[in-house]
Image: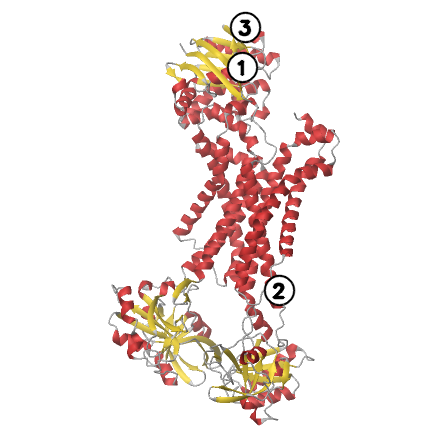
Amino acid sequence: MFRNYLKIAWRNLARNKSFSLLNILGLSIGLAVTALILLWINFELGFNQFHEKKDRIYEVYNKYEIDGEIWTWNSTPKIMAAAIKKDYPEVEAVSRYFYNNTFLFSKDEKRIKSTGTMVDPDFLKIFTFPLVEGDVETVLEDVNSVVITEDFAKKMFGNEPAVGKIVKVDNTDSFKVTGILKNLPSNTEFNFEFLMPWKYVKQKGWDDENWGNNSVATYVLLKEGVNYVAFSKKIKSLRKSYDKGAPDMVTFLYPYTRSHLYSEFENGEEIGGLIDLIRLFGIIAIIVLVIACINFMNLSTARSEKRAKEVGVRKAVGAQKKALIGQFLGESILISFLSALLALAIVLIVLPSFSEQVVGRELTIEWANPWFWIAAISIILITGILAGSYPALYLSAFRPSSVLKGTFNKKNTLITPRKVLVITQFSIAIILITSTIVVKKQIDNVQNRQLGYNKNSLIYIQMEGDIEKNYEIIKSELLDSGIASSITKTNSPITESWSNTWGFEWKGKDEENKTLVHRLVADETVVRTMGLQLIEGRDFDLKKYATDSTAAILNESAVSLMKLKNPIGQTIKDNGTDWRIVGVVKDFVFNSPFQKIEPMVIEGARAWFNVIHIKFNLERNMSDNLAFTKTIFNKYNPEYPFNYEFVDADYAEKFVTEERTEKLASLFSLLTILISCLGLFGLASYMAENRIKEIGIRKVLGASVSGITTLLSKDFLKLVLISIVIAIPISWYAMNQWLEEFDFRIAISWQIFAIAGILAMAIAFLTVSYQAIKAAKSNPVKSLRTE
Amino acid sequence: MLLQLNNIFKWVNSGGQRIFLLKDINLNVEEGEFISIMGPSGSGKSTLLNVIGMLDGFEEGEYHFLDESVHSLKEKHRANLYKEYIGFVFQSYHLLDDLTVKENLEMPLLYKKFKGSERKAMVADMLDRFNIVGKKDLFPAQLSGGQQQLVGIARALISNPKLILADEPTGNLNSKQGEEIMELFKQLNEEGVTIIQVTHSEKNAEYGSRIINLLDGRMI
């Protein structure tokens, strides 16, 4: 029986090649999209889940009420870990995680920069990062011991054994390699290449016992069998006895397994996080698959006239409805299976670029995982059944007595369920088209935003090694040679703000005003180097005005926040220093270009520096400039490789998330349109076939080709029109929701809907008209003779 | 007694009016009969055949088939009944274009859940009996009309039905092919198969042992 079904299904496919191709192509695109999204979801759900003791691992969080709003954050005082270990016997292990540091490792002639951190010895007992070599109990015991990953060991020592080797760190301290870690998997949030013991933090004098300095992460491993809820109550008031500054700060343990997917807090409550994106994509996966299934249903039922006779005959020789439903479902499962093979090929081709462009991490197919096969087979079966159910019920319900007599009613127009399906498809397609246009316009708009500074030929360099010491000589050599036109050192790159406070004081400040004001610290010529636009006053110039080390330049937002009438010459207070205002600049974008510009004060050279900005001489060749700059830095900072960032490239990074959204939106709308058009093409061809006699008669009576083309296309275009009407309010609402997130945003204009509507109409018309024109041009003598 | 129709009425409602397709049909068919149903177009011949073949229902009356009351049977039982005892032959053959001759013959057996080996034997037997062994792997489109009808009859006979219902079996054939088919029916009837055929042709009707004339759904 089954073989017979398979045989007839196969022959049906082979006989109607174009139909089969449309069906399989549409379904395989849908399946490929679903598979890609599922692979990604699977990756994200598995993130951080590989630790053997994951159910007992917690990260320490704090909650604190400020101005009626509860703030939640996960950095803790360095001293807290010791307090937890001392006070709570339920805790098996505690480890701090110092923030990531980049150190220069050297051994003989080899110099490699590497990122890692300092942790407590328990770290490797809490998390499952297995050691290939070394003993967990002792690797981090000695202050000058370091554990490195396999990859780092290979980079540093080649194929020689690494354990026992001595390396110099930042040219000052010697470390002995005591252990080799297995390379970190791609699905962990940690990205260290080495671990050093916390003792090193102490030795360097970076440790402190200040409860007000919340700066490191603290991880806790509870003993087996400890009740989390009961323990939460106990640890809540941890700070009461220690933290005199903020005794009401609540301490709580956040389950580590939730950290990747949830960890967004609002007013003290977990409100989601990445999981929202995962749900959204899950829905998109289902929508695309459903659209592909709709195609299948439409094409199959449109072909029903062809198969009506078969149903009649089979019923007449004894087939029951059940058997026929089985047969048709079997066919759709076969098609689904073939589509899955094609989809797999598509996935294998697309996966590398999908991983890189969209996910940002490497996704792999786990061939050996039985769940992969179970999931794949279930999807094939579900798709086959979903796509085949309606055609199967529809076809198997034919009455043999009417079908075989030939009085089976051929319906020329699209019947209602099929109409609904086409409208659904096109509504989704139009929603996606409008979304793509809105996202693209929003990004273009922001990219064209007046930055307020000039990012061309501007680079910045982190101050490390001897740069600080030799800054003046580096600066004068670069300026004298004519390579650079202006150089300024600052506390942060111009593209970011690393410092802010609500502690500024100015005349007439309302005590309740807690507006954050950003700080940029610069030595001199900051306006010139960055190309800021001065409205009033002047740039910093330490040579002319020695007091400029306590001068300040404000942006317009800061001026309006402080309600300063004549800002130049007035003083404001920050950190106990009086800053005299010497200039006002136009607002410039320093954080997210999507948000409004916040108040900023550029402070003079009294404070600290991290970065050097170099504005190159525009009249010279950029690569020569860079080459020369490199030789100078190598001369005055010989131990460190020369690293620099272009400000314009750095700025472009700010668009990564939105550009990813745009890429995804355009990808999915393209695919949806493609699938929908495949379906429409199929429907049009069958309708043209069914109406061949009508077309013949009309032509004999004098109808023109264009008249018939219009006649045939009209029905379909009507459906697209209805889809447009349905899609506009939905996409308007959805896109407004999306835009809400941005301060700097476009207004949704009617033109966007017009473009999307016209585009959808045009695509539908092109798809349908090919068949319509073909039918209209056919010779009526031929078509009428077939009767 | 093979089957018995008592006061069968069949109608459709059209525009508030009841249009009768069959009116008060009473018919007894004994095993081994060869009946020809005649009448002008639209007189209800095919409808009557479909009712007898249980492909179509009726509004009023009683239908007994081998002591089973068809009118009160559930759909499933009815299907089992005709699957077991009835074979159909159509004017336009109604072979499945996508299946070969052999596979077309095999199809009814699939629905009766015969085993693979049994099916093979029965198909081979039938091909042999109708002398179409050489054609077994051809598709219907590669056969002449007469040959296609031969396959159609073979398919109807393959599961040894008691009753063959033939709706103008020679309607699409030329006279020589038609004659051969009628000879075949006659021979089958002599072997004990009950046959009811619908026909327009007086000559073909003569093959039967009894002629029923229909006019406007009524037996005359």
- The numbered disc on residue B44 is 1
Determine if residue A218 is in view: yes
Circle 2 sits in a helix, a strand or a loop, which is it?
A: helix
Amino acid tagged 3 = Glu
Looking at the rendered structure, whether the residues under marks 1 and 3 are on a common chain is answered as yes
Q: Nearer the viewer, residue B147 or A427?
A: A427
Amino acid tagged 2 = Asp
On screen, A159 above or below B21? below
Q: Residue at x 36, y 72 (%)?
A: A62
Circle 3 sits in a helix, a strand or a loop, which is it?
A: loop
Local packing at callout 3 (Cα closer than 10 Å; few below 14, some 14-19, many 20+) is some
Q: Give the side of residue A465 with respect to residue A182, left or right.
A: right
Q: Give the side of residue B60 with respect to residue A611, left or right.
A: left
Image location of residue A127, percent across then percent down:
34, 68
Q: Between marks 1 and 2, how big is the CA–CA gap? A: 74 Å
Q: Between marks 2 and 3, how big is the CA–CA gap? A: 88 Å
- Residue designated by label 3: B206
- Residue designated by label 2: A444
Image location of residue A665, percent across then percent down:
56, 56
Amino acid tagged 1 = Gly
